[in-house]
Image (spheres, rainbow, N blue to C red):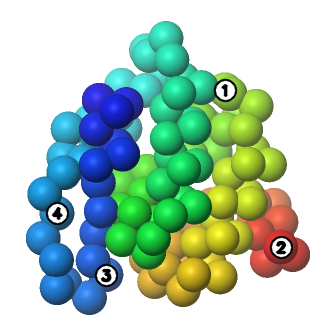
Amino acid sequence: MIKDVLAGYKDAYGGRTQQGGSLGTYVVGFWQYFTDKAGLAANLISMLRQSWYTQNYIATHFMHIIPEIAEATGTRAEFIEAFAVAKRNDAKTVINNLKDLPQDWQDDIAQK
């Protein structure tokens, strides 16, 4: 499942259909039981640093659990920087869903 996260993408304008990453979305319900939480965090961060297709996929499926994953793996700063990259890239779903992050995360992303 962790590896399948890397195959996900979402076209915020509806022009592309998601082919990969479906299995990866099951991470949402099970991530706390994984032994490789750091690998999951690394994959999510990597996806947030790529294209707006991958950035929007992460925002659609994982935004609400990222603060918990960051706390469990000590990767808050890396996630903040990755979200800032996605915001600068104009990833629409990321921008629209930033409000779902804790206020201190929103403030730190805005300062990047």
Q: How far apart are marks 2 and 3 (CA)?
A: 23 Å
Question: Pointer 1: what residue?
Answer: 72
Tags 3 and 1 in contact by the CB under 8 Å rule? no
User: In this figure, what is the number of numbered marks?
Assistant: 4
Judging from the image, what secondary structure is the residue with disc 4 in? loop
- Disc on the earlier residue, 2 or 3: 3
Q: Is residue 33 above or below residue 50?
A: above
Say which of marks 3 and 1 sits in front: 3
For badge 4, the amino acid type reads Gln
Residue 73 visible in the displayed image: yes
Question: Pointer 2: what residue?
Answer: 112
Outermost residue, front direction? Answer: 50
Image quadrant holding the N terminus, namely top left
Residue 99 visible in the displayed image: no
User: Looking at the picture, how far across and down is residue 63, in whole percent?
Assistant: 49, 56
Q: Distance between the residues labelled 2 and 1?
A: 23 Å
For badge 3, the amino acid type reads Ala
Tags 2 and 3 in contact by the CB under 8 Å rule? no
Question: In the picture, residue 67 is in which quadrant?
Answer: top right
Judging from the image, what secondary structure is the residue with disc 3 in? loop
Question: Pointer 3: what residue?
Answer: 12
For badge 2, the amino acid type reads Lys
Q: Distance between the residues labelled 2 and 4?
A: 30 Å
Q: Is residue 83 above or below residue 39?
A: below
- Disc on the earlier residue, 4 or 3: 3
- Disc on the earlier residue, 3 or 1: 3
Image quadrant holding the C terminus, namely bottom right
Question: Pointer 4: what residue?
Answer: 18
Q: In this view, does 101 lie to the left or right of 51?
A: right
